[in-house]
Image (tube, rainbow, N blue to C red):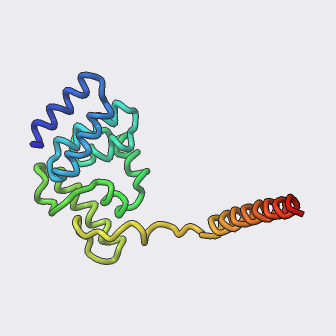
Amino acid sequence: MPLNETLARADADLAAGRVPMARQRLRGLVSSFPADLEPRRRLGEVYRLYGEPAEAGRWMYLEQDRDPVETLAFERRYATAEQRMRALAWSGPESLARSAFAREQLAAVRAACSDALGAPADWDTLPSDEGTQTKVSALPGYVGGTVFVLVILVFLAIWVNGLVALFD
């Protein structure tokens, strides 16, 4: 569906009070048109309606007239440059941005990420998030699984014992 038509539908959804539908449409547009700033701005406005400053700040991050409180909330939620780079969901070079401010912001985030990684970062080839997350211990899952198996075995033993006693 064309960009303008989907934006019009999102506006109609908002006017009709269907905020979740408008949000879904706008997220799809950001995904389909990552270099277009208009869907990002509108998505930020929808998150503002939800009262979610970090998400509003995320989608308004490339706008010069962004709210400093929302920007700070976004930067706190996505504390590292690598997390911010992923959260911004940009695709392609910064030169695709239609404003000088957005190009500067994107370049600054990419440069900070490159510094943190110790290697050049690229919007389209950023490594997956798996290596940067803290590994969670498998022990609780292992213990829980073992307890579950033991409970089943005890239940089966009692059932078999009752069945044997029935025919004895």
Indicate whether 24 appears above or below 148: above
Q: Quadrant of residue 1?
A: top left
Q: Quadrant of residue 42?
A: top left
Q: Give the residue displayed 22% in from the left and 66% down from the top.
A: 124
In the foreground, 145 or 83: 145
Q: Quadrant of residue 129?
A: bottom left
* Residue reaching furthest to the bottom: 119
* Residue reaching furthest to the top: 16
Indicate whether 61 appears above or below 115: above
Q: How many marks?
A: 0
Q: Give the residue displayed 30% in from the left and 71% down from the top.
A: 114
Q: Give the residue displayed 77% in from the left and 60% down from the top.
A: 155
Indicate whether 140 appears above or below 39: below
In the foreground, 94 or 19: 19
Q: Is residue 33 left or right of residue 55?
A: left
Q: Is residue 161 left or right of residue 83?
A: right
Where residue 45 sits: x, y (%)?
28, 34
Tell me the quadrant of the picture where the C terminus can be found.
Answer: bottom right
Where residue 152 sits: x, y (%)?
72, 62
In the foreground, 15 or 110: 15
Where residue 24 sits: x, y (%)?
28, 40
Q: Give the residue displayed 40% in from the left and 45% down from the top.
A: 73
